[in-house]
Structure formats: structure tokens, C-alpha cells
């Protein structure tokens, strides 16, 4: 009843009509290779069912667009021989949060699933690898029935594999796996303490639903300080930044960041201080940059009695907003194991 489509292997490669748009999920990995690889989703885990749920907040497909292809981006560092699989694909929408999807497949559908790719044998292409990554080769399934996307909801892609040419067991076919991407930097310069020390401010990479650590080293020992955190470095209370403090009696010292949040404390006996700031689980914080600077009381450093540090900043990242439910060895399963915020890099085409 099922038959091999001779043209399908070629269709799985990159070329399609120029009118179509290709989208990478998550979007911050569009030009960035993932941090690892995995073969378990969606094609190479043996027979079974893999239901992927993609957050609408990070799926750059317009409302009402017609999705024509779904698939994955291979791991750039890997090569692999393609196999044949007997595949069916269903799609639908989900209104559950990515972190609270159900292990029951049917529960995750907001409306009944649509069979967008009827069960048939698919020949997966050989993976050629790429150096450097990310891979430009995409493994895409051309849908029999294109799917109209409702951008107000998360997207479900349900891969059901009932047989493969590897004896129905798992085989090596690595896909790219994303993680959170954040960045950090320091800027400006510190001025010098009365004891000759030059303080240094640094920060860790921050990410949503994690912790942002800000640390001071080489400061004046046992000294009061204030730490200032803001989202800008251009002005504060109408004062252009950076603002030199030489005119106030602190030569070579400058205010570098705005002051909406201020914390106070005292340095340690070695002149250190640190703050571990919890980052809320708000997706709106993704790709937002925060800046910090510390002012340390040093009565003998200058006539103002204050030393300023360099600035430090981080641009927050976020865990991949993708969860999949995996039922190994049983394509007829109704439940599976949840892999919450797993980072498989998805590829879509739409018109």
C-alpha cells in the first residue's frame, strides 16, 4: 500500500521555489551553529512518535502563512548515510505553555490534528557536513497538504515513524541542537583607589529564568559601595553619559550607566563584592541588555571621596522555547516522555 517516492529524496534537499521563505527555529540560531547534536528527533530514533511544540513567540512565520515544508537542520560537524523511513506527519496548534505541555499527545492539540503528510516511505538524504557551520543543507519534508498557521498559538509538528531500513531501530543521523545564546562585555575604565588598587567589574552571561552574577574584584577593602544597574548608557536624569566626575573632584572617574536600580553593600576584607540577581521567567527579556557599574567610597582617593569602576553588561539569552514528547518503539502510542525546552533546530518553509 505504501510506496517509495523516487522524487522525494531530491525534494528533501535545499532547493524549492524562489517564492518560498525559509525560517530557522530558534531564530537566534539562524546563522549560529548549535552547541551539540542529537539523533533522537525526529527521524532517527527508530520506530515511534515524536511530537514537537514550537513557541509562537520565536517562530517567525506570519499569521495566515501557508507552511509547505517542515524539517531539521543537520549537525554541521557530522556526516551520515541517509536511510529510508516510513513516515506520517500531522500538524496542529497548541495553547499550552512550552514548559507545561502534556505527555499525552492528544491533550496538546487545541484543535484536531491535520494529516499534512500521508504515510509513505521517505528516503533521507546523506548528510554532507559543513565547515564552518551552520549547515546549509536542510532535511525537509514537502507536505502533501500545506498547513495554514495561526500565529496566536504554538505550532505542533507530529512525526510518526512506523518502519525504517535500519531494522526498525535507531540509527545515526545527527541534527543540530541549540542552547541559549547570551553575551557579555566590559566597557569604560576604572579610576584608582588611594591604596593604588584599580577595581574591576565583571559579569557572567545572563539568561531568562536563570541568574545574572555581577562581581567586583580589587576594590578598596571593607569599603561601602553602591551598585547601579540600568538598561541604558546614553543618559540618566537628563545628564548625558558617560559623565566625567573630574569637575566634582574625582579626576579620571566617570558615571557610565543609568541608575534606575541601586544596591548597596560593603566590600570584603579582600576588596571583593558580588551580586547574584535572579532573572524572571519573562520571554520579553530575551535579547535585552543590562548594564552595571559600582561606586566605592574612598575618602582619601580624591576630594569627592568616590571611585568608579568600569562598566559591565550582559545581553540575556533564553533556553530554546521548544518541547517535544517522545514515544520510542511504538508509533501508535498515545503518551510519551516530555523533553522540555529541548533545543532541536527546526526548519520551515512557507509562502
Image: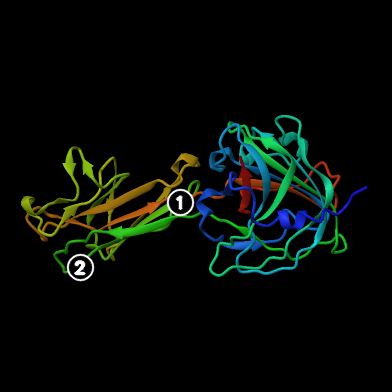
The single residue placed furthest to the front in the displayed view is: 18
Element marked by disc 1: strand
Q: Say which residue appears at 54% left-offset and 39% top-offset.
A: 57
Looking at the image, is mark 1 or mark 2 nearer the viewer?
A: 1
Q: Which mark is residue 59?
A: none
Residue under pointer 1: 211
* Residue 91 % position (x, y): 72, 39
Q: Say which residue appears at 60% left-offset and 31% top-offset.
A: 64
Mark earlier in primary sequence (1, 2):
2
Above or below residue 50? Residue 73 is: below
Q: Quadrant of the C terminus?
A: top right
Structural distance between the alpha carbons of marks 1 and 2: 29 Å
Q: Is residue 41 visible?
A: no
Residue under pointer 2: 197
Q: Nearer the viewer, residue 209 or 27?
A: 27
Q: Nearer the viewer, residue 324 or 30?
A: 30
Amino acid at each position: 500500500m505504501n510506496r517509495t517516492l523516487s522524487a522525494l529524496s531530491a525534494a528533501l534537499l535545499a532547493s524549492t521555489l524562489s517564492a518560498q521563505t525559509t525560517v530557522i527555529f530558534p531564530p537566534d540560531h539562524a546563522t549560529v551553529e548549535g552547541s551539540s547534536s542529537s539523533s533522537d528527533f525526529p527521524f532517527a530514533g527508530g520506530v515511534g512518535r515524536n511530537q514537537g511544540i514550537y513557541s509562537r513567540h520565536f517562530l517567525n512565520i506570519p499569521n495566515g502563512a501557508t507552511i509547505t515544508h517542515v524539517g531539521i537542520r543537520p549537525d554541521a560537524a557530522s556526516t551520515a548515510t541517509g536511510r529510508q523511513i516510513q513516515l506520517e506527519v500531522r500538524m496542529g496548534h497548541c495553547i499550552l505553555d512550552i514548559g507545561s505541555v502534556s505527555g499525552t499527545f492528544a491533550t496538546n492539540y487545541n484543535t484536531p490534528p491535520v494529516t499534512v503528510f500521508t504515510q509513505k516511505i521517505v528516503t533521507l538524504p546523506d548528510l554532507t557536513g559543513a565547515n564552518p557551520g551552520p549547515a546549509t543543507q536542510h532535511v525537509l519534508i514537502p507536505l502533501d497538504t500545506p498547513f495554514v498557521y495561526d500565529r496566536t498559538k504554538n505550532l505542533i509538528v507530529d512525526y510518526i515513524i512506523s518502519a525504517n531500513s535500519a531494522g526498525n531501530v535507531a540509527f545515526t543521523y545527527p541534527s543540530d541542537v541549540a542552547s541559549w545564546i547570551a553575551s557579555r562585555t566590559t566597557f569604560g575604565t576604572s579610576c584608582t583607589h588611594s591604596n593604588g588598587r584599580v577595581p574591576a567589574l565583571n559579569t557572567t552571561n545572563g539568561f531568562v529564568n536563570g541568574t545574572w552574577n555581577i562581581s567586583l574584584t580589587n576594590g578598596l577593602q571593607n569599603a561601602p559601595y553602591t551598585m547601579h544597574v540600568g538598561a541604558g548608557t546614553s543618559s540618566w536624569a537628563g545628564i548625558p553619559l558617560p559623565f566625567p566626575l573630574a569637575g566634582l573632584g574625582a579626576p579620571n572617574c566617570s558615571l557610565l550607566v543609568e541608575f534606575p536600580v541601586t544596591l548597596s553593600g560593603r566590600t570584603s576584607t579582600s576588596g571583593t563584592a558580588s551580586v547574584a540577581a535572579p532573572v524572571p521567567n519573562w520571554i520579553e527579556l530575551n535579547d535585552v541588555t543590562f548594564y552595571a557599574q559600582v561606586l566605592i567610597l574612598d575618602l582619601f582617593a580624591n576630594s569627592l571621596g568616590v571611585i568608579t569602576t568600569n562598566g559591565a553588561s550582559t545581553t540575556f539569552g533564553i533556553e530554546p522555547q521548544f518541547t517535544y514528547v517522545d514515544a520510542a518503539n511504538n508509533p501508535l502510542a498515545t503518551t510519551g516522555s516530555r523533553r522540555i525546552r529541548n533545543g532541536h533546530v527546526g526548519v520551515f518553509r512557507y509562502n
